[in-house]
């Protein structure tokens, strides 16, 4: 028996509310997306980064269809408020992700903002950007003691096997 | 304090309304023509002047019956649901050793990356000159004593006048 008001409970609703309303949400996401296309790596709140990720990937999908496609051009024209980014989108970002089917963006969580609001932050970037990597590749240093000893051991083994094969 | 005053005010205004109504209707005997009678001419006065006691008050307010003992208070205040929860998702960063949350980037390492990124962006800004002047080519960052390789042909080169940091190699 339904005892509760459907409108007041939001169990299972996945659509997020941002800003002053749906139009405000789209405008906000448009600004963030323009910033992302311009700078290729931006820092925002976690929720905004999550929302923008979907739109960023869809924009690349449209851009991949090509410059001459009318729908793609309309989409790019709507979503990018700074019009000098439209050539960048079609000539730089679309060819970069030619061989990838999906997953053009990467989102990583950051520690909370230092302000009074302590907002949960995230950084979102297009893969293949020229900046330093967020997840640095772990490289073993050859000059460690352990690595030097292992290197010496390997060389000794190589020498022994060489002398054995000779004799 | 103001609540009891408010209650008193309400009660007095109600009584005033009541007496006004009675005078208007004419049921009030105290202002009638005074007859020359011997004897007690005192007519029973309506009981207006006595202070309204709390027992007559219409409002019954909820009030604690007994003082909460310190033992009971301690039980409530030190109950686990009021204590600060222990975080088990703190771990040291592999690169720098500072503490960080799991599934979150290390703040120290990200500071380094952020500073370098802002310096690169400043360089890009100088190269572009005016705002809204993005070229439609890829960008590559080269440090001191580095020459563009074959993969860097046709890309815009951003020069940084420092040695390549160990954490920036791709």
Image: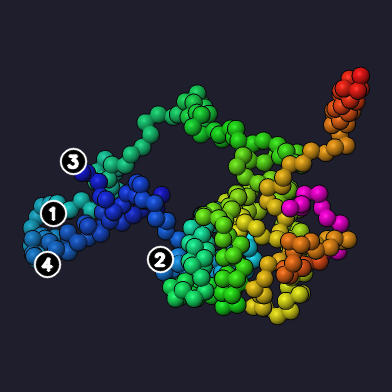
Chain letter of the residue carrying label 3 = A
Of the numbered discs in the image, which one, if any, rests on residue B24?
4
Expressed as whole percent of the image width and height from the top left, the position of residue A67 reads 52, 74
Magenta stretch, main secondary structure, is: loop
The label shown at residue B43 is: 1
Q: Residue at x 25, y 46 (%)?
A: A4
Secondary structure at badge 1 equals loop
Sort mark 3 into few (<14), some (14-19) or many (20+) by Cα contacts within 10 Å: few
Circle nearer the N terminus (1, 4) = 4
Which is more toward the observer, A91 or B95? Answer: A91
Q: CA distance from mark 1 to mark 2?
A: 72 Å
Residue with the mark numbered 3: A1
In this picture, which residue range is highlighted in magenta?
B160-170
Can you identify the residue that label 2 sits on? A21
To which quarter of the image does residue B16 belong?
A: bottom left
Of marks 1 and 2, the one in the foreground: 2
Give x and y (percent) for residue A72.
Answer: 47, 71
User: What kind of element bears circle 2?
Assistant: loop
């Amino acid at each position: 028996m339904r005892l509760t008001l459907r409108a007041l409970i939001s169990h299972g609703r996945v659509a997020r509310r941002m800003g002053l309303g749906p139009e405000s949400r789209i405008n906000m996401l448009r600004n963030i997306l323009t910033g992302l296309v311009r700078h290729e790596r931006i820092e925002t709140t976690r929720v905004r980064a999550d929302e923008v990720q979907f739109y960023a990937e869809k924009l690349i999908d449209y851009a991949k269809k090509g410059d001459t496609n009318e729908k793609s051009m309309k989409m790019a024209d709507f979503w990018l408020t700074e019009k000098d980014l439209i050539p960048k989108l079609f000539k730089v970002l679309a060819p970069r992700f030619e061989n990838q089917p999906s997953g053009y963006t990467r989102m990583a969580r950051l520690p909370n903002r230092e302000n009074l609001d302590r907002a949960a932050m995230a950084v979102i970037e297009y893969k293949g950007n020229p900046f330093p990597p967020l997840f640095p590749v772990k490289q073993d240093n050859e000059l460690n003691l352990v690595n030097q000893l292992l290197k010496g051991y390997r060389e000794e083994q190589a020498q022994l096997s060489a002398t054995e094969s000779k004799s | 304090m103001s609540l009891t005053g408010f209650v008193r005010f309400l009660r007095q205004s109600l009584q005033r309304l009541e007496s006004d109504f009675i005078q208007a209707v004419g049921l009030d005997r105290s202002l009638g023509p005074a007859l020359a009678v011997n004897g007690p001419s005192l007519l029973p006065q309506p009981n207006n002047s006595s202070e309204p006691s709390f027992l007559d008050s219409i409002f019954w307010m909820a009030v604690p019956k007994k003082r909460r003992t310190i033992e009971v208070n301690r039980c409530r205040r030190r109950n686990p649901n009021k204590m600060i929860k222990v975080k088990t998702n703190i771990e040291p960063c592999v690169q720098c050793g500072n503490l960080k949350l799991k599934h979150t980037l290390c703040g120290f390492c990200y500071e380094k990356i952020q500073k370098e990124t802002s310096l690169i962006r400043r360089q890009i800004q100088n190269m572009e000159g005016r705002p809204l002047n993005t070229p439609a080519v890829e960008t590559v960052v080269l440090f001191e004593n580095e020459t563009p390789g074959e993969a860097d042909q046709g890309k815009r080169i951003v020069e940084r006048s420092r040695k390549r940091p160990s954490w920036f190699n791709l």
